[in-house]
Image (cartoon, coloured by chain):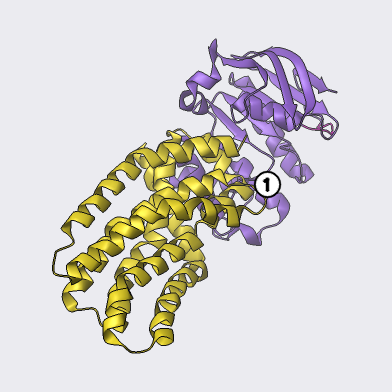
Chain colours: A yellow, B purple
Amino acid sequence: MLAAARCVVYRDLLLALRRRGDVAVALLFFVIVASLFPLGIGAEPNLLRSIAPGVIWVAALLSSMLSLGRLFAADYDDGTLEQMLLGAAPLGVVAAAKAFAHWLVAGLPLVAIAPLIALQYDLGAGLWGILALSLLVGTPVLSLLGAVGAALTLGLRGGGVLLSLLVLPLYVPVLIMGAGAVEMAAAGLGGGGQLLVLGAMLVLAAAFAPWAIAAALRISLE
Amino acid sequence: MLEAADLHCERGGRVLFERLSFRLEAGEFLRVSGANGSGKTSLLRVLCGLLTPSRGCVRWKGEPVAALREEYARQLVYLGHAPAVKGDLTAEENLSIACTLAGVAASRDAVKSALARFALPHDVPVRRLSQGQRRRAALARLALSGAVPLWLLDEPFAALDTEGIERLGALLSGHAEKGGAIVFTTHQDPGIAATRTLELA
């Protein structure tokens, strides 16, 4: 079972490595969207500081969604997804591994680059840590929830648009808690509470989303 | 081993087949033939458990396959219409990943010799190979799946040259001799003596 999970993660990372362009596009999208706001709004430090958490989190959310469409679609087209459904390991384990690989490729780089973006918004050095931490806990939830949507819209016409409509509302609690943690910390109240709620969301999503993804995949492949 | 009981299949409001029943024992070869759109692929997908029949059920050694799931999946190899190989990976990577996911132990050497048997380069990304070679890359999995009893193959002879057809034929008869069971679909005569045929109208 673990061998299969490791194999899926290895395979998806290898594929991402062979198609570096796709990964770079999502990352660049994040950097550009987050950089447009200071350019458009102007250099008013207080305003920038107050919008920073929300803007960075929204950019992360959109960037993470950008690569969701490909999560299962490519495997669906070439038949490898069918083989995963007929694999020796439970499909939930494979689904969890795919979501984890998506996070490694589309979520983790955002965590690493967020402090740099925060620089443009004049966020204090103490807040970088909270921002990165909130993204570190929050982006895996985005990958897990997004994978459920991607599995449900697999093979549908106009699936891309439907995927956004389906997934974005589910992302709202993550956005509120993630941005809230940074705002609270900026106000000197400490963002611990929000981070804990984010952590709870992650635990719940990690426990239940893989089985929802598996069920959705079985329906989509019928 | 494999038993189909009173299978009905409907796709998009059209009945593909109904009241289909058969038994397949070890060492048997079942050739499913029929015109395009007669439901050959759907039948194979029902047999491997990807598709739920609208009525009836498939049993493996007496147990319904819907209840067995992964346990049944470990007993079968299904090669569908799509070759199920990743264009960005080499044939060797494709094969070893497919084997790991299927729970079939395959060493590096075993993978290389399976590819050599199908005359495939092991270090070229599959997208640079021809259609027939891609098909071979998918079929190479069979050379490593001797221990898996049930093979379900959808149009395995499509896009293969005569030499490839011979190799595959030898592999199939070898498997049947060792007590495996094979179901394959085809709309042309592959020149292989199937022990049974099933004609879908």
| Near-viewer residue (B122 or B186) | B186
Quarter of the C terminus of chain B within the rendering: top right
Q: Secondary structure at mark 1?
A: helix
- Tell me which corner region of the image, top left, top right, bottom left or bottom right, holds residue B154: top right
Quarter of the N terminus of chain B within the rendering: top right
Residue A202 within the segment the image draws in magenta? no
| Horizontal arrangement in the rendering, residue A190 relative to residue A158 (left or right) | left
Taking A98 as reference, is A121 above or below it? Answer: below
Please report the residue visible at 54 percent of the width from the left and 33 percent of the height from the top: B145
Q: Which residue is mark 1?
A: B135
Estimate the x, y position of residue A30 in percent, counting from the top left: 42, 72
Estimate the x, y position of residue B82 in percent, counting from the top left: 67, 44
Tag 1, which chain?
B
Estimate the x, y position of residue A41 in percent, counting from the top left: 40, 85
Please report the residue visible at 54 percent of the width from the left and 59 percent of the height from the top: B123
Taking B120 as reference, is A111 above or below it? Answer: below
Estimate the x, y position of residue B25 in percent, counting from the top left: 63, 13
- Tell me which corner region of the image, top left, top right, bottom left or bottom right, holds residue A108: bottom left
